[in-house]
Amino acid sequence: MKRRSLVQAGALVLLLGRQHLARGATILAVRVWPAPEYSRVTIESDTELKVKQFFIASPPRLAVDIEGIDLNPALKELVAKVAANDPNIAGIRVAQNAPGVVRLVMDLKQAIAPQVFTLTPVAAYQHRLVFDLYPTQVIDPLEALIAERLTDSTPAHPPADPLGDLIAQKNQKPVAKGNAPETKPPPSKPLAEAPEKTDRLIIIALDPGHGGEDPGAVGPGGTREKDVVLRLAHRLRDRINATSINGNTMRAYLSRDADFFVPLHVRVQKAQHVQADLFISLHADAFFTPRPQGASVFALSQGGASSTAARWMAAKENKADQVGGLNVRAKDAQVKRALFDMSTTAQINDSLKLGGAMLGEIGRVGKLHKPRVEQASFAVLKAPDIPSVLVEAAFISNPDEEAKLNSDAYQDQLANALMRGIQGYFSKNPPLARNRTV
């Protein structure tokens, strides 16, 4: 009789334990990542969360029922994590909607196309429930760059439609380097006459690595790669925007201008959308030991990597989508695959030239890890029509170099070196003219 009671009690405890597990998911962290392109809300838990979502168009808001949990202090933290200047989220409300069901309502500032998905454990993260809130009305980045260019100049005889004129000039794609046919001046013009000046933007796409959920490498002092490379990108942007090449204005375009995650293939697509002349991805290297040091520059390889270290580095950087939290179901895998299969020999050759120019200048302000441009299959370098390089500014895992990366003086020196490298590349490889189509 006593034994039967013990068995029944054990069964009751087991049953209660199962119910507790079903309704007792532990919320480990909640995070909000605001950005003009999209705002992300992440709820991290020790088990996968099940949700039902409802989008209400007017006024715009997203309601989500999270099943298997009760309202707790961690979820209440979301309310205070929404910043007043979040471009997409006006506020978040949470409440116990039913036993074991928490309702979360996001009040939105504009029409939104929401994506709700889950991520399995990776790196330092456990299960993540992700809400990506994309505004339905977006600003065209190319038009924004051209509009900025127009506000900085007041020509004596402005065209009737200056914005349309510059867009037409930028949209006229050049013939690929190495394949351009030989051209001769028209016989009606004297040979000594200077060629007609073409006023167009030279756009340099800067890609600060990692961001948002993906911190990148973390130094022994706690420095995050995503933070130092964003500061470096801002410094380089300022130098690019203050420079002209052969009388043509330069403008920098950042793949991310704040702390948010951008998938690797989207970084490539952004550079292509603004028709960038160059693509420079900025990173800070890391290794298992604190000893390695020095900067490196990488270009794409159509074949194998130029070294074991280059192959290892590419494999590490290509995992950024897993850590950052890519919504695989929303990704157009076919487009991505086609994009990444079109890298050309001409693009790689131009990338090696750009990398060589930058590496030489970096070596004047700091140590180099390797004296030549390395090559490997970096996903972020696979724009088929844009010379592209990846710069590892220093080893953030080395305490001395971590301190340098946090130094304003060294960041300025490095930004100056990268700017000189860009100018050196263009001095030997002038950007081709893009004339307005009639």
Image: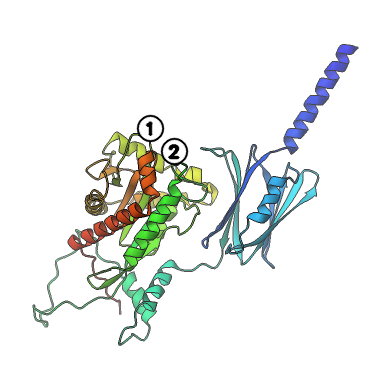
Could you tell me the amino acid type at mark 2? Pro
The quadrant holding residue 294 is top left
> Mark 1 vs mark 2: which is more N-terminal?
2
Say which of marks 1 and 2 sits in front.
2
Q: Residues within 10 Å of mark 2 (few under 14, many from 20)?
A: few
Q: Nearer the viewer, residue 86 or 336?
A: 86
Distance in Å between CA atoms under marks 1 and 2: 10 Å
- Please give the residue where the numbered disc 2 appears in the rendered image: 220
Examine the rendering and report whether any part of residue 354 can be seen.
yes
Secondary structure at numbered mark 2: loop
Could you tell me the amino acid type at mark 1? Thr
Secondary structure at numbered mark 1: loop
Image disc number at residue 14: none
Query: Where is 239 relative to 287, above or below?
Result: below
The quadrant holding residue 245 is bottom left
106 displayed left or right of 315: right
- Please give the residue where the numbered disc 1 appears in the rendered image: 289
Q: Name, please, the residue furthest toward the right.
A: 1
The residue at the point 29 percent across, 76 percent down is 436
The residue at the point 38 percent across, 64 percent down is 274
314 displayed left or right of 374: right
Examine the rendering and report whether any part of residue 275 can be seen.
no
On the image, the x and y values in percent for residue 339 come to: 38, 52
**On the rendered image, what quadrant is the C terminus found in?**
bottom left
The quadrant holding residue 266 is bottom left
The residue at the point 36 percent across, 77 percent down is 152
On the image, the x and y values in percent for residue 208 come to: 41, 53
For the rendered model, the colour scheme is rainbow
